[in-house]
Amino acid sequence: MKPVEIKEFGQLPDGQMVYSYLLKNKHGMMVEFISYGAVMRSCVLPGNQGLDVVLGFDRLEDYLASMNMENPPYFGSIVGPFAGRIQQGVFSLNNKVYQLSQNHGSHHLHGGIDSFSRALWIAKPQTAEQSITLKYVSTVGTDGYPGEITSTLTYSLTDDNELKMNYKAESTEDTIINVTQHHYWNLGGHDQSVENQSIQLNATHFLDKNTDNIPTGNFEQFCEKPFNDLTTGLRSGLDHTFVISDQSEIQASLSHPTNGWKMLVKSNQPAAHLFIGCGLPENLNGKQGVSYHATSGVCFEMQNFPDAPNHEHFPSCVLRKDEVYENNTIFHFVNNDHV
Ligand code: G6D
């Protein structure tokens, strides 16, 4: 196995260096990460087209600027401690009421101001296989979360064109957790539109939500059986949490109509939050000078339910101090022309 390629990517305002890590497999698939936000910056599929299927930026400055926007895109980052919204940033745990940072109107979104997406993760490259392990420790009380939360994230690339994400967290106190990845995918390339790509979900219901995007607690049925193509009607302004019907099969897929590429998503998480960039800042200048737009990419944020602490009938998001939380998600790329 070739060792992981490591390069300096840029310096943070406080002088700390951000590094990039490039994984390659035997088919020429290449995936690059940077230690700021544990961001996946590029994912190039095998074949001579050099198809880069995720949105991102070429410079650290652009990632920093994007995270300071009113509605950050969180391009490629790890989102936490709690992905999604928490109403008014308030939740109760062990008969105590906690107030998290209110970084999205009056609500808490994607881990708040000092989100995992803004953190400098420390990497430990492994050469046993094409993988990197990144660590980050968020101190007690960051954004109002109880407990010192230690995150360990391993991305590995297999010779079957699978990108595996294993995320683990432990906390020194009972806390809440719901971590996911925020990759924007486009199987035609990051410079195209996903409008003609089909989405299938192992789901029949999604979470009803109010005008603030906060779950009401009700489930809304959108099709009779799982794996129906997501209709265009539901896709415009897609920002919905789909309730996974069955953990045994794949949970979601994205397929390109002509180039043969299909991405299969398998995860141990109870939901898939899908987001097609409604509300993203207009004309974000991305990699290679590409100007991104509302349908440049689609996110498959495999996670628990948003606002879970405030809905008893949602799956628990509590991480007890003697437990380990895990999010295991695999993105498997298949194409009959590239086996
Ligand atoms: C918006 O509501 C959406 C989120 O789901 C998304 O993650 C974010 O933009 C980037 O807040």
Image (tube, rainbow, N blue to C red):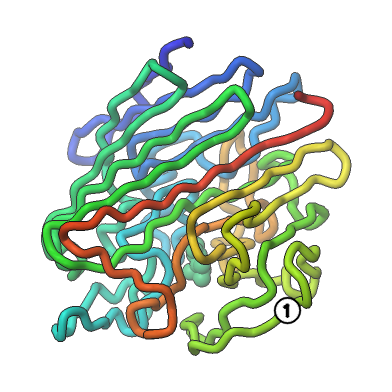
The percent coordinates of residue 285 (x first, y second) are 57, 46
The percent coordinates of residue 281 (x first, y second) are 54, 61
Q: Within the image, what quadrant is residue 274 found in?
A: bottom right
Give the residue furthest to the top: 2
Tell which of 87 and 158 is nearer to you. 158
205 with respect to 328 (left or right):
right
Residue located at (43% from left, 55% from top): 180
**Which residue is denoted by mark 1 in the rendering?**
222
124 with respect to 230 (left or right):
left
Residue located at (31% from left, 63% from top): 177
Give the residue furthest to the front: 248
The percent coordinates of residue 72 (x first, y second) are 44, 60
45 with respect to 88 (left or right):
right
Q: Secondary structure at mark 1?
A: loop
Is residue 173 shown above or below 336? below
The percent coordinates of residue 227 (x first, y second) are 75, 62
Tell which of 26 and 105 is nearer to you. 26
Task: Name the residue type under label 1.
Answer: Phe
Give the residue furthest to the right: 258
Q: Within the image, what quadrant is residue 283 found in?
A: bottom right
So how many labels did they put on this image? 1
Q: Quadrant of the C terminus?
A: top right
